[in-house]
Amino acid sequence: MLVLARRLNESFMIGDQIEIVVVEIRGDQVKIGIKAPKSISIHRKEVYEDIQKENLAASKQNVPQDALNEFRRMLENQDDKQ
């Protein structure tokens, strides 16, 4: 784990597109701002873990084989058009 020390209004970069800024420090709480492209999902860790659990549960649901075959055909047709 990389640990960085930053003061109020200082920031650091993750790659070329994500900037993390220290917005406010009050007691033992630090507020940060995140500047990132809209295509990048940003969630609190507990929310992210809930999303992962829901996705896993959804992937375990039984889907009829004919629906999967139809979806596969649709994807193949889409690839042929590109």
Image (cartoon, grey):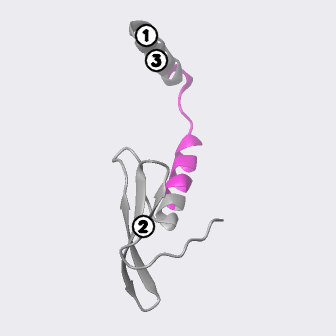
Residue situated in front as seen by the camera: 55 or 26: 26
Magenta part, dominant SS: helix
Q: Which residue bears the numbered disc 3?
A: 75
> What residue appears at the point 52 percent right and 20 percent down from the top-left corner?
66
| Image quarter in which the N terminus is found | bottom right
| Residues at marks 1 and 2 touching, judged by CB atoms closer than 8 Å | no
Badge 1 or badge 2: first in the primary sequence: 2
| Image quarter in which the C terminus is found | top left
| Residues at marks 3 and 1 touching, judged by CB atoms closer than 8 Å | yes
The amino acid type, in three-letter code, at marker 3 is: Leu
Cα separation between marks 3 and 1: 5 Å
| Relative image position of residue 15 (x, y in whole percent) | 49, 49
**Element marked by disc 3:** helix
Q: Which is closer to the viewer, label 3 or label 2? A: 2
Badge 3 or badge 2: first in the primary sequence: 2
Q: Residue furthest bottom?
A: 27
Q: Which is closer to the viewer, label 1 or label 2? A: 2
**Element marked by disc 2:** strand
Question: Does residue 60 appear to the left or right of 44 in the view shown?
Answer: right
The tag on residue 11 is 2
Q: Which residues are magenta?
A: 50-66
| Relative image position of residue 30 (x, y in whole percent) | 43, 80
The amino acid type, in three-letter code, at marker 1 is: Asn
The tag on residue 77 is 1
> What residue appears at the point 45 percent right and 13 percent down from the top-left corner?
79
